Amino acid sequence: MKILQDAFARSVRYLETLPERSVQPSTAAIEALAGLDGPLPQEPTPEQEVLERLDAVGSPATLANAGPRYFGFVTGGALPVSLAANWLAGAWDQNAHFVVGSPTAAALENRALAWIREILELPKSWGGGFVTGTTMGNFSGLAAARHHLLGTLGWDVESKGLFGAPEIQVVVGEEAHTTLFQGLALIGFGRDRVTKVPVDDQGRMRSDSLPDLEPPTIVCLQAGNVNTGSFDPIIEIAPRAREQGAWVHVDAAFGLWAKASPSTAHLVKGLEQVDSVATDLHKWLNVPYDAGLALYRDPEIARRALSITAAYLPEGSERQPCDYTPESSRRARGVEVWAALKTLGRSGLADLIGRNCELARRFAAGLDKAGFEIGNEVVLNQVLVSFGSDARTREVIAAVQLEGTCWCGGTTWNGRAWMRISVSSWATGPEDVDRSLRAIIAVATDC
Ligand SMILES: Cc1ncc(COP(=O)(O)O)c(C=O)c1O
């Protein structure tokens, strides 16, 4: 077991040095990845040598997104306890498909699910499945919607497929996330066969522009626009849509967690009125990749749509973890989710979400004071900033990444280039924001 002790020592060293190294790996480190190439060895390699090589070549070429000053995409850093739980779960090596395959994994999933329902103030009758991320969470919600809407019309879609099936109208906001379209493509609805609803200047679906929602219709809402952090008005749209017989799905990759903090909970008002929700756990709950969740108002519909074992058999007395996901063999994602929630508690989670939002406002205020344009209402943890022309903004983004104090990505919003800052990590403190502000402003002034 020396190899495991060595891996542990190397991991701790990696994490301890992270806050002071460049967030962006150097070009030399990336070029050195070529050192991992070569033919498949004919003979075994000593495991110690393998680990040494991984650490020597792999570690320096990583982005320091587990550290405190990575603000790219929407990326949490794994809470130490969630990483520790992940290591333990790795040692357990459980297959979390059925209860019989891992009573521990199933019990932890059940408890984590119950706690998440409690945080979201959803009734106990809601169920869910742990998936790889929101992309698969959206896919799962759409599969449940497809099963339900076509089943109501007497069409057994799991047996007959979509050939000759009644058409389903799919309604999305103009600013729906690109991965929702991936789900629509995979589920057989098509990326382009959608009705797009106009949005306001923050990317929120305009409830006064909804089309006729005659059944069968799926309405896909969004909680947390990846650029602005804004929310579709769930409370205005969901009850109306359900009244007309539509299935309402919410892509809430990171926005769902707004519910955990009293300062932002109002943004997801009406959540209990929808049919399915997809979210990420690896983003704002700060657990390791890959972890997401599909939540269902009626879990039995999801089970019938997704289960490999008993699509048309009555549910047994126990919840089988894989029955609510499109997967069979799966890692025990509930372990680190349970550990994160148990450690944070309600107040710790509220603090994490509230603090990140406050730090996003600190970023926006600092950049605004320095004379740069802020492109969004900072309602959550996302900030858009422009440094002038698109070309100049892109130049500043590249220079900030190269300088290495922090890492922010680029995006296009309302036809213009912006730098996007996402504050999503437990590790980020005010001093990290101030240090990053100094670096960004200095780089932008020099560019
Ligand atoms: C709104 C939204 N939906 C879906 C996704 C996709 O999530 P994942 O990559 O974890 O599947 C993202 C990722 O940023 C997102 O912001």
Image (cartoon, rainbow, N blue to C red):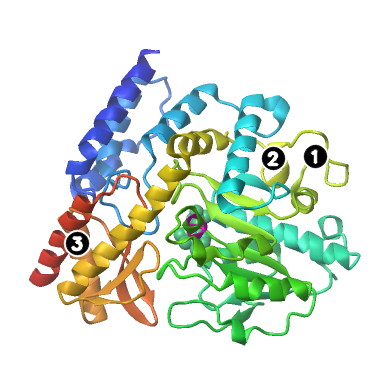
Q: Residue at x 28, y 27 (%)?
A: 10
Q: Magenta stretch containing residue 303, yes or no?
A: no
Residue 49 appearing in the image: no
Q: Quadrant of the N terminus?
A: top left
Which labelled disc corresponds to residue 279?
A: none
Callout 2: CB less than 8 Å from ligand 1: no
Residue 400 - label: 3
| 415 left or right, relative to 91 | left
Question: What separation in Å lies between label 2 and label 1 (alpha carbons)?
Answer: 9 Å
- Local crowd size for mark 3, using a 10 Å CA cut-off: few (<14), some (14–19), many (≥20): many
Q: Which residue lies furthest to the left in this view?
A: 446
Residue 357 x/y as whole percent = 35, 59
Magenta span of residues: 253-257
Q: Residue at x 37, y 34 (%)?
A: 80
Q: Along the polypeptide, which appears first: circle 2 or circle 3?
A: 2
Image spot of residue 13 (x, y percent):
24, 29
Q: Would residue 132 be seen by someone viewing this image from the given angle?
A: yes
- Mark 1 = which residue? 309
Measured in 3D between alpha carbons, the distance from the residue under mark 3 to the one under mark 1, in whole angstroms, is: 51 Å
Mark 3 lies on a secondary structure that is: helix
Q: Are marks 2 and 1 in contact (CB under 8 Å)?
A: yes
128 and 132: which one is in front? 128
Circle 1 packing at 10 Å, graded few (<14), some (14-19), many (20+), is few
Q: In which quarter of the image is residue 436?
A: bottom left
Q: Distance between the residues labelled 2 and 3?
A: 43 Å
Query: Which of the pair 446/84 is nearer the observer?
Result: 84
Type of residue at label 1? Thr
Q: In this view, does 399 lie to the left or right of 165?
A: left
Label placed on residue 322: 2
Q: Going by the picture, which residue comes out furthest to the right?
A: 154
Please state which amino acid type lies under the numbered disc 2: Cys
Res 158 → quadrant: bottom right
